[in-house]
Amino acid sequence: MMENNTAQHPSKQIGWTREQMAKRAAQDIPDGAYVNLGIGMPELIVKHIPEGREVIYHTENGLLGMGDSPAPSEIDPELINAGKKPVTAIAGAAYFHHADSFAMIRGGHIDICVLGAMQVSQSGDLANWSTGEAGAIPAVGGAMDLVAGVKRIFVLTQHTTKQGQAKIVHQCSYPLTGQGVVARIYTDLAVIKKTGDGLEVVELAPGVSPQYLIEHTECELIFPKGSA
Amino acid sequence: MINKRVADVHDAVKDIFDGATVMVGGFGEAGSPIELLHALIDHGARDLTVVNNNTGSGHVGLAALIENKQVRKMICSFPRTANSTVFPDLYRAGEIELELVPQGTLAERIRAGGAGIPAFYTATSVNTPLAEGKELRSFGDRQFVLEMGLTADFALLKSQQADRHGNLTYNKTARNFAPIMAMAAATTIVQTSQYLEAGQIDPEHVITPGLFVNRIVYIPSPAHESELVAANRSYP
């Protein structure tokens, strides 16, 4: 797992760190939102929610109002999150069964879901569950339900793979999780939103030029006038 | 007089037959009915189709049932686990079948099966490999895929509280699939950590009404899967 962006962009001390990426995404989560966070980097968002906002976290295994990790003495093996890690329940939390949990998801009752990505396409397609390689054990979990039902899907990911390949591409080569589902992308280089015309750059990370972003992206990007 | 309590786990599972479809409660270790699973290993029924979100961990519980070659097919959403090689090894060797189902679709298929609904449409998995070969239909401007309800011959579940009527409550996120599996199985078998007199569970607090439950077995101190795995235990 990458600690910062320097391995991807070794010659340039530019862009956001993982924590800064999470902090940037957290700015776009409003007060009162019901949010589902994917396993991994999206979980960093919790500690970066701006002061004064109350955000309620949903974990699809059956808890609304997920709290922090418990102290070792407080661990209950039957109070876990979707990543099967011990968690706590906040005051005002609720437990429910899986059909209710996915009714919340599929029924459009969750406001925002933040997920990792293997690839995102120009039209907002997301691939994040399988490389489709022979011999791999296929596993999907709740990813396809989340992208089909949550009101807004945010992707939080490094802009390129560890090998430097673009993750934002014209068309996904990996099997899709959902078609046209991504609303916004937060990477170490930029914030990008999906529009009817394609992917539009909302913000460039410090030190990132439009040219640099274009070189590390395998599809057209829209730069609105006056943006950079 | 209704009394669904049975003497022990072996009594509880003794009629599970070869080729049966068995729903097993639990998400990871939360809600996993370890003692019932071990009794099913002792009982020995084979050629089972098992429905569970995962495939167990270590060499106990569901992973041990799979390792003991009693399972022909798994229906699940996430068959990989960091601390189990049992299912992946058998799958790569072609010795076990897998029906991969998105987690919410799995839950709704079970709910529908228990509610007498043969099939339903969902947007989940449309335009992905998991919708291939399935009927598509448009409602409004959106496409949906037809998914079939799922029922089972047996369900093996874990509850926190139960009474002789079979009314159940659960512990925190151990609830997960249990209430819907209780509805979808012809015979629902529950191990409970507390056995109470009728009336001791407030009717307002009953999560699974007793008519969905057939057998209760009292296991006051159930094992925790993670502790067994950490101690490198295996079963049998």
Image (spheres, coloured by chain):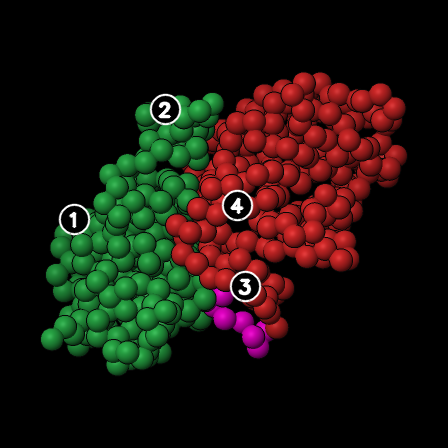
Chain colours: A red, B green
A144 relative to A102, above or below? above
State the residue position of label 2. Answer: B137
- Mark 1 or 2, closer to the camera: 2
Marks 3/2 in contact by CB < 8 Å: the verdict is: no
User: Which amino acid lies under the numbered mark 4 shown in the image of this protein?
Assistant: His
Location of residue B86 in the rendering, given as x and y in whole percent from the top left corner: 37, 52
Marks 2/4 in contact by CB < 8 Å: the verdict is: no
Please provide the residue range marked out in magenta: A72-79
Q: Chain of mark 2?
A: B
The label shown at residue B19 is 1
**The N terminus of chain B, quarter of image:** bottom left
Q: CA distance from mark 4 to mark 1?
A: 39 Å
Find numbered disc 2 in the image and state the secondary structure of the residue it sits on. strand
- B188 drawn magenta: no
Q: Chain of mark 1?
A: B
Q: Residue at x 70, y 30 (%)?
A: A193
Direction front: furthest residue? B204
Q: Residues within 10 Å of mark 2 (few under 14, many from 20)?
A: some
A74 relative to A196, above or below? below
State the residue position of label 3. Answer: A93
Query: Same chain for marks 3 and 1?
Result: no
Query: Same chain for marks 2 and 4?
Result: no
- A78 drawn magenta: yes
State the residue position of label 4. Answer: A109
Q: CA distance from mark 3 to mark 2?
A: 37 Å
Marks 4/1 in contact by CB < 8 Å: the verdict is: no
Find numbered disc 1 in the image and state the secondary structure of the residue it sits on. loop
